[in-house]
Amino acid sequence: SFGFICAQPPPKCKVPPPGISASSSSSSSFSSSVNDNNNNFLVLMDHYIAHPPDIYNLANQDTADLLGDTVFTCFDVRSGNTKKDHYGVISHYKIWLDARFGQYALCNGYNPGICVGREYFKVGRESSLGMKKEGGQCANNTDTGSWFSFPEKGQCKSKQQLEDGNPTACTWYIEERVKTINITCPFYTQGMLSACKNDEGKAPFYEKARSIFERAFIYNDEKKGGCRDLGGPPRSMLLP
């Protein structure tokens, strides 16, 4: 689970927040593209999540963008909570979603996960650690990273269902699981644990740790800073 929820629910984002647009695709820390065939609010985003090795279902789970998951996993591993949270691996997904975000929800547990918050349909969003006004729900969080919540009731059965543009049908769809790595690889093999400690309180936010985390997913060769892809379940297991 990730961090904090706002006491008062701000209104849903009317448009995708700054930093989430087709122009962001050139950034190494954030890649997205906008589907403008039927719905200009649909965005394909890279999401990361630490999870048990045998559970890949994202319904009622919290994820993060690259910097956001750098922050979250740094806190989790350094605090010694990884075993208690049953985290053994970290996965990278590409997810289509309606970027008119709702309030972030705090999700815990598995099969099924349980989310605490005021949003049960739209994808929730906040800045890492909820450190911005209104939790950073509709803010430009490229400097802090973002955390997201994926309510089960918003999951699409098909990409077409999302593209149809019916705002009451669904809000998110898993395009693919890109890569899954052992959580020990970036933190212990590649030195991310030390970088997390050294980056704390410095600007740019978790810069060295983020770079190590990113390389772990770009490469498979450990000599290049990469981590081996452990594989995952068949695509059918990622759908409702």
Image (cartoon, rainbow, N blue to C red):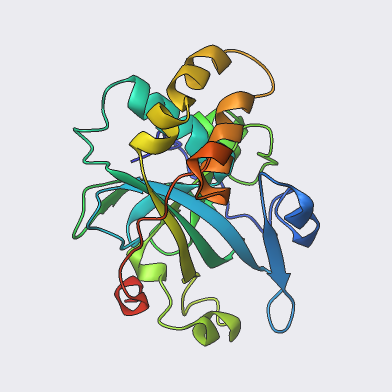
Would you say residue 58 is visible in this rendering?
A: yes
Pinpoint residue 171: horizontal percent, then vertical percent.
50, 70
Q: Is residue 136 above or below residue 75?
A: below
At 77% across and 62% down in the image, what residue appears?
Answer: 22
At 41% across and 55% down in the image, what residue appears?
Answer: 229
Pinpoint residue 32: horizontal percent, then vertical percent.
68, 60
Please identify the quadrant where the N terminus is shown: top left
Say whether residue 170 is left or right of residue 224.
left
At 43% across and 27% down in the image, what residue appears?
Answer: 74
- Residue 204 lies in quadrant: top right
Say whether residue 142 is left or right of residue 23.
left
Pinpoint residue 186: horizontal percent, then vertical percent.
44, 35
Pinpoint residue 150: horizontal percent, then vertical percent.
41, 58
Please identify the quadrant where the C terminus is shown: bottom left
Between residue 188 and residue 37, name the one nearer to us: 188
Say whether residue 182 is left or right of residue 214.
left
At 57% across and 56% down in the image, what residue appears?
Answer: 46
Q: Residue lying furthest right in this view?
A: 23
- Residue 155 lies in quadrant: bottom left
- Residue 59 lies in quadrant: bottom left
